[in-house]
Amino acid sequence: MDAFSDKEYTYWWGPIPAMWTWQEERIRRRFADPSTQQFKVVDDADGKIVAWAKWDPPSQMVGLREGFTVYDEPVNAGTGNKNAKETRKGDGEIEAHTLGPPEGSNAALFKTFFDGVAGAEKKFQANEKLVLTHLCTRHNYHGRGIGSALLRSVLDLADKEGLWAYLEATRLAVPAYERLGYKIVDKLEFDRTEAGFDTPSVLHVMLREPQALKR
């Protein structure tokens, strides 16, 4: 949650405390979904998680099928989640709509945001691509290359399997993703005047084509 404290992206349609509670529940639901893949970096000095990434891999991706761990409660990975197809990328952010807006939020702005994200995912066929939905790094660990290191191994698998990758990035994150081979292909711009902001909230839609692996 510390990684997304910037109102440019997450907290402009509702009160921050309510949004934190809402996001925590949303993330916990994702942890219980075996169709997602999640990775973390831990500081050995104190055991604190300093970076975390969540991917929604396409059904044809082979490399990420093993080794997934559910942290909150036991899940039979062999049978999978019967609702997996309903909760993955390109779904119009079904979880967000299921949870509804955080208490005290502007429901119209909330809906506009997630409908916009869903529209971009449908336009660029995100369901056929490796989708990065979250990359979180604690602020005091920025600038060390931790986030990039967390992503490279998964992107290497995508390259090996010839898969495209997709994400939506905030303005500040774009340069880091560009260094990993992503390119801006579209932009989502949200009017925030109703929320009391003079500037729009902008997400950059980025694609990464499979790259030749360095030998």
Image: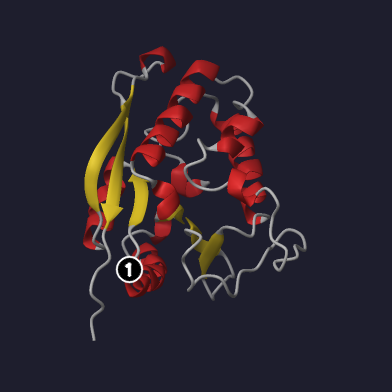
Mark 1 surroundings within 10 Å by alpha-carbon count, few (fewer than 14), some (14 through 19), many (20 or more): some
Q: How many marks?
A: 1
Direction top: furthest residue: 194
Direction front: furthest residue: 60
Residue 134 % position (x, y): 46, 51
Quick check: 99 left or right of 40?
right
Residue 169 % position (x, y): 33, 45
Quick check: 199 left or right of 53?
left
Quick check: 61 left or right of 125?
right
| Residue positioned 28% across, 23% down in the render | 199
| Residue positioned 47% across, 20% down in the render | 109
Task: Report helix, strand or loop for mark 1.
Answer: loop
Q: Give the colour scheme of this rendering.
A: secondary structure
| Residue positioned 33% across, 43% down in the render | 124
Residue 205 % position (x, y): 30, 42
Q: Is residue 27 above or below residue 196?
A: below
Residue 80 % position (x, y): 69, 60
**Residue 10 seen in render:** yes
Q: Quarter holding the C terminus?
A: bottom left
Name the residue that disc number 1 marks: 162
Q: Is residue 104 above or below residue 170?
A: above
**Residue 106 seen in render:** no
> Amino acid under label 1?
Gly
| Residue positioned 54% across, 76% down in the render | 44
Instruction: Please identify the quarter of the rendering in which residue 190 is found.
Output: top left
Q: Is residue 147 above or below residue 123?
A: below
Frontmost residue, 52 versus 30: 30
